[in-house]
């Protein structure tokens, strides 16, 4: 629970933000801090409309501060309108000067709307451009995603069918983060390159370098392909669209070609976003089959759609993932400007993975020994080992783990590991 002084600053910050935003049409939703933006977001109009009005209800909704007026009623620059329980800023200049004299510099630097105003004053050294750059973009908000989905769904039955093809996640709802994953140096470098490509997107457009942002993730199951793609969504603040090719062709046979086109059209409408196509090896399987001409036409449509989408032009990062790269032919390979390898983790990576997944677990562990015991295990396997060890301890009403708990979990899973690796090597 915040102290009363912080609560007062929250309310005054909201009042100042509303006043500045209402009076400057050049400011938009990306100039509002996410909690304020999310509260005032109009899903039907897909914007934060003007004027923003501050009421006790909005103060409670944004900051969880009930009876906000009781906290600020002694300030000489605010008033209260009982009709609607509205709190008004009556003397802006006085309120702005009062706020600047408080311990508010960090607030101003994290609020682009306030930075916009105070950067024009001589008393405070703050950069509006920097504040706006560091503010989380509106594309991260689930409210922005859901309102766009609702808009698309409202276009009719065809649009609803299109949405069934794709699992859509807002960046703020993605659990994975790059900081919690163990990446190879190549994977780190590719993530950094994509971030730079987004930053210099206009420059890339100027020099007509369009073939950037199409990645193929290659590696055995459980090595982190999907996790890295989802974490990239969170890192870059871009919506995540996930498609499984086998699901499209089996569920919508006969309409597949049309629906693949719709998926790519949806990605362009949701831009900037990440379009993640899992099971990309399904392309190769269907190209070899003679059973259904409709599927072959759909595959050709998929390859053409990949050609026609671009990070530079459309704001879409395309990521394909495959567990079976040997099945892909040259027609599939050449669609991607970068192939990113997801190898089985070595002992060093396994040690790092154990350290990360055990970071919040009470106990003392020899992660090097655990890494040495889990040769040929993926990161997913290591999480399953922890799962079994935790569940066994909970069965005994323990919330702490021992090294022996984890070693027993490794032993219990050894047969499963052998079966899994045998199945993968025989595909």
Image (cartoon, rainbow, N blue to C red):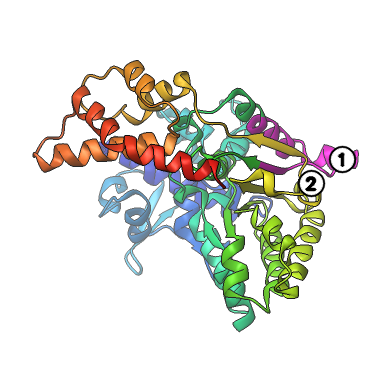
In the rendered image, which quarter contains the N terminus?
Answer: top left
The residue that disc 2 covers is 312
Query: Which residue is located at x 67 percent, y 58 percent?
Result: 285
Looking at the picture, how far across and down is residue 127, in whole percent? 63, 30
Please tell me whether residue 313 belongs to the stretch shown in magenta.
no
Q: In this view, does 414 lie above or below 255?
A: above
State whether residue 117 appears in this view. Answer: yes
Name the quadrant containing residue 385: top left
Residue 135 in the image: x percent, y percent?
A: 56, 40
User: Helix or strand or loop: what does disc 1 sit on?
Assistant: loop
Taking the spot 22% from the left edge, 22% from the top edge, the residue there is: 403
Where residue 253 is drawn, which disc sits there?
A: none
**228 to the left or right of 327:** left
Mark nearer the N terminus (2 vs 1): 1
Residue on which the image places disc 1: 209
Disc 2 element: helix
Q: Do the residues labelled 2 and 1 touch (CB within 8 Å)?
A: yes
Query: Any magenta on residue 197?
Result: yes
Q: Which of 133 and 150 is in front in this view?
A: 150
Residue 314 location, x and y as percent?
76, 53
Q: Is residue 302 above or below residue 315?
A: below
Stretch in magenta: 190-216
């Amino acid at each position: 629970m915040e102290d009363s002084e912080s609560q007062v600053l929250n309310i005054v910050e909201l009042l100042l933000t509303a006043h500045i935003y209402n009076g400057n049409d050049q400011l938009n939703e990306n100039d509002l801090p996410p909690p304020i933006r999310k509260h005032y977001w109009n899903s039907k109009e897909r914007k934060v409309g003007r004027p923003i009005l501050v009421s006790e209800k909005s103060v409670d909704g944004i900051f969880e501060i009930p009876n906000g007026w009781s906290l600020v009623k002694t300030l000489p620059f605010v008033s209260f309108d009982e009709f609607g329980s509205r709190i008004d800023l009556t003397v802006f200049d006085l309120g702005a000067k009062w706020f600047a004299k408080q311990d508010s510099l960090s607030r101003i630097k994290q609020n682009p709307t306030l930075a916009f105003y105070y950067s024009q004053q001589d008393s405070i050294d703050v950069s509006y451009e920097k504040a706006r750059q560091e503010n989380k973009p509106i594309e991260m908000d689930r409210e922005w995603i859901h309102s766009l989905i609702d808009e698309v769904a409202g276009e009719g039955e065809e649009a609803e069918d299109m949405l069934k093809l794709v699992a859509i996640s807002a960046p703020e709802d993605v659990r994975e983060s790059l900081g919690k994953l163990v990446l190879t140096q190549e994977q780190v470098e590719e993530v950094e390159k994509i971030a730079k490509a987004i930053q210099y997107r206009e420059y890339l457009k100027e020099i007509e370098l369009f073939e950037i942002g199409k990645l193929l993730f290659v590696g055995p199951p459980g090595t982190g392909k999907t996790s890295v793609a989802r974490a990239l969504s969170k890192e870059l603040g871009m919506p995540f669209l996930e498609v499984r090719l086998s699901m499209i062709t089996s569920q919508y046979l006969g309409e597949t070609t049309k629906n693949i086109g719709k998926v790519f059209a949806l990605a362009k409408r949701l831009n900037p976003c990440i379009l993640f196509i899992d099971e990309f090896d399904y392309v190769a399987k269907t190209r070899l089959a003679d059973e259904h001409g409709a599927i072959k036409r759909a595959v050709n449509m998929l390859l053409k759609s990949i050609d026609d989408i671009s990070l530079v032009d459309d704001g879409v990062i395309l990521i394909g993932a495959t567990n079976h790269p040997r099945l892909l032919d040259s027609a599939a390979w050449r669609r991607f400007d970068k192939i990113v390898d997801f190898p089985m983790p070595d002992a060093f990576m396994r040690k790092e993975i154990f350290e990360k997944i055990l970071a919040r677990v009470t106990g003392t562990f020899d992660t090097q020994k655990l890494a040495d015991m889990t040769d040929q295990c993926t990161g997913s396997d290591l999480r399953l080992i922890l799962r079994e060890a935790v569940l066994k301890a909970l069965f005994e009403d323990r919330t702490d783990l021992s090294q022996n708990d984890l070693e027993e979990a490794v032993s219990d899973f050894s047969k499963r590991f052998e079966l899994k690796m045998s199945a993968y090597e025989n595909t």
